[in-house]
Image: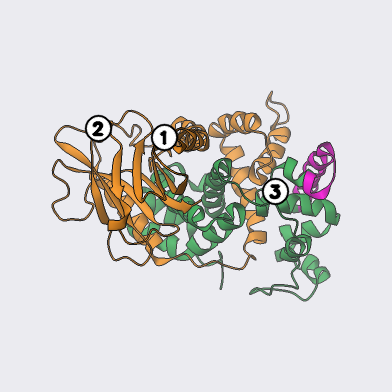
Chain colours: A green, B orange
């Protein structure tokens, strides 16, 4: 399923801002499953995850007027809002902290889970100007341990303390790995 | 391009990556959000980072959202529409992009929600000895708007369910709070009775179908004698789901 290419997130948010409820339901159809997946991965608690997704849609509805095209990716906006709600919900919900290095690394290995547009290997990807700035490619340049830090933070919503404990590394090391990884990613993405 | 200004866009945009990852400390996060509220550039950077990282989570095995979730969202929207002049929800007209990032009510609500655990534990401790045996099922009902905890539901082996207010309860004149529950698979919510100001509501759970995980509980504002339709019609003041413990 195409995830984000054909759907006009920007227009949908603008319609929501005008009070067109149909637009919010279109966004729901398009994104609710993905949002729930992301939130569920962080919270590991289905009822709470559903509550957060509910709240996220209400908040999207109320705040759609604060979005404009100048702010860039509307899909990014939707997820920032939703992930913030999920990360906040973590404060009053216990969840297990698990190391799943293979699973996480597979998420950014294009060969594992085939999606619509997938070249055969990384070099092809890098040569393809359309894909030159993909995060997936840039993540490949990070050492596995550093990549894991970034993925645990983003995909699992783990704190740096949790990651340090999980990987059995000093907190300072994890912090500096994450900072440097972000700088490297930023450079690569430009 | 902003190299000559006093601002330090490089540092800020690094922080935007960390903000998206969720690795800023609460203090750094609040400070960053204040800055974010006033900066289109930073908001753009945050949305851009988010869009990049989404390519990773887009590969997670999807979990299908249950149908009732969209119905629940629609219902909340109905309620929002019904209360345009509601004075309790301030900022009904969101004020440019500041409102999202600077939503103090939200942050306060969240810190209040952090208290929930403490409060629940406190109530558990208080109620263990004198009246109830150990709670077996519990739910915290929070305001849908800002997650402020308002009520706790607990049941015990004594077959009583208690709805306990956590603070002062404001009920508009001529109105009442009606307590509802709905488990997955039920067609409609069932009324558990009307709540009086400052009172703990006790319900005999033998009169109810068995409580289930994830069962929804909510309080709505209805006419003094309760909803005439037998279904919730007024705005939700508190909502939450039950868990067995």
Residue at left offset 68%, top offset 47%: A158
Q: Circles 1 and 2: CB distance less than 8 Å?
A: no
Dot 3 surroundings within 10 Å: few (below 14), some, or many (20 or more)?
Answer: many
Tell me which chain the residue with mark 1 is part of. B
Residue bounds of the magenta highlight: A165-188
Check the image and name the residue furthest to the top.
B6
User: Mainly helix, strand or loop, the magenta region?
Assistant: helix
- Position above or below: B11 against A108: above
Quarter holding the N terminus of chain A is bottom right
Q: Which disc number belongs to residue B197? A: 2
Same chain assignment for discs 3 and 1: no
- Residue A153's disc number: 3
Crowd tier of the residue under label 2, counting other residues whose Cα lies within 10 Å: few below 14, some 14–19, many 20 or above:
few
Between discs 1 and 2, the one toward the N terminus: 1
Front position among marks 3 and 1: 1
Instruction: List x then y, in percent, for residue A121.
Output: 80, 73
For label 1, the SS is loop
């Amino acid at each position: 399923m195409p995830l984000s290419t054909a759907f006009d997130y920007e227009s949908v948010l603008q319609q929501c801002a005008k009070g067109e409820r149909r637009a919010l339901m279109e966004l729901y159809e398009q994104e609710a499953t993905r949002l729930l997946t992301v939130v569920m991965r962080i919270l590991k608690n289905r009822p709470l995850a559903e509550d957060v997704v509910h709240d996220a849609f209400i908040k999207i509805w109320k705040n759609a007027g604060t979005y404009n095209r100048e702010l860039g990716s509307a899909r990014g906006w939707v997820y920032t809002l939703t992930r913030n709600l999920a990360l906040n919900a973590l404060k009053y919900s216990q969840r297990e902290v698990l190391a799943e290095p293979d699973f996480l690394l597979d998420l950014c290995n294009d060969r594992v889970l085939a999606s619509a547009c997938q070249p055969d290997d990384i070099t092809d990807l890098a040569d393809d100007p359309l894909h030159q700035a993909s995060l997936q490619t840039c993540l490949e340049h990070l050492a596995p341990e550093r990549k894991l830090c970034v993925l645990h933070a983003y995909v699992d919503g783990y704190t740096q303390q949790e990651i340090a404990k999980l990987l059995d590394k000093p907190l300072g090391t994890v912090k500096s790995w994450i900072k440097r990884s972000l700088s490297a990613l930023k450079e690569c993405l430009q | 391009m902003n190299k000559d200004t006093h601002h330090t866009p490089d540092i800020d945009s690094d922080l935007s990556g960390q903000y998206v990852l969720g690795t800023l400390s609460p203090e750094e996060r609040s400070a960053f959000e204040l800055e974010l509220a006033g900066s289109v550039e930073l908001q753009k950077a945050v949305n851009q980072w988010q869009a990049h990282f989404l390519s990773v989570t887009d590969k997670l095995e999807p979990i299908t959202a249950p149908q009732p979730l969209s119905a629940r969202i629609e219902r909340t929207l109905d309620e929002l529409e019904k209360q345009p002049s509601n004075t309790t929800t301030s900022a009904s007209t969101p004020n440019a992009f500041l409102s999202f990032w600077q939503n103090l009510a939200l942050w306060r609500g969240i810190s209040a929600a952090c208290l929930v655990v403490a409060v629940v534990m406190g109530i558990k401790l208080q109620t263990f000895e004198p009246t109830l045996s150990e709670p077996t099922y519990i739910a915290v009902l929070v305001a849908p708007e800002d997650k402020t905890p308002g009520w706790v539901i607990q049941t015990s082996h004594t077959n009583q369910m208690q709805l306990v207010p956590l603070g002062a309860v404001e009920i508009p004149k001529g109105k009442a709070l009606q307590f509802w529950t709905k488990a997955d698979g039920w067609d409609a919510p069932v009324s558990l009775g009307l709540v009086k100001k400052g009172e703990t509501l006790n319900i005999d759970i033998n009169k109810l179908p068995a409580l289930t995980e994830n069962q929804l509980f909510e309080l709505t504002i209805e006419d003094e004698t309760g909803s005439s339709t037998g279904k919730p019609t007024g705005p939700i003041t508190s909502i939450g789901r039950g868990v067995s413990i």
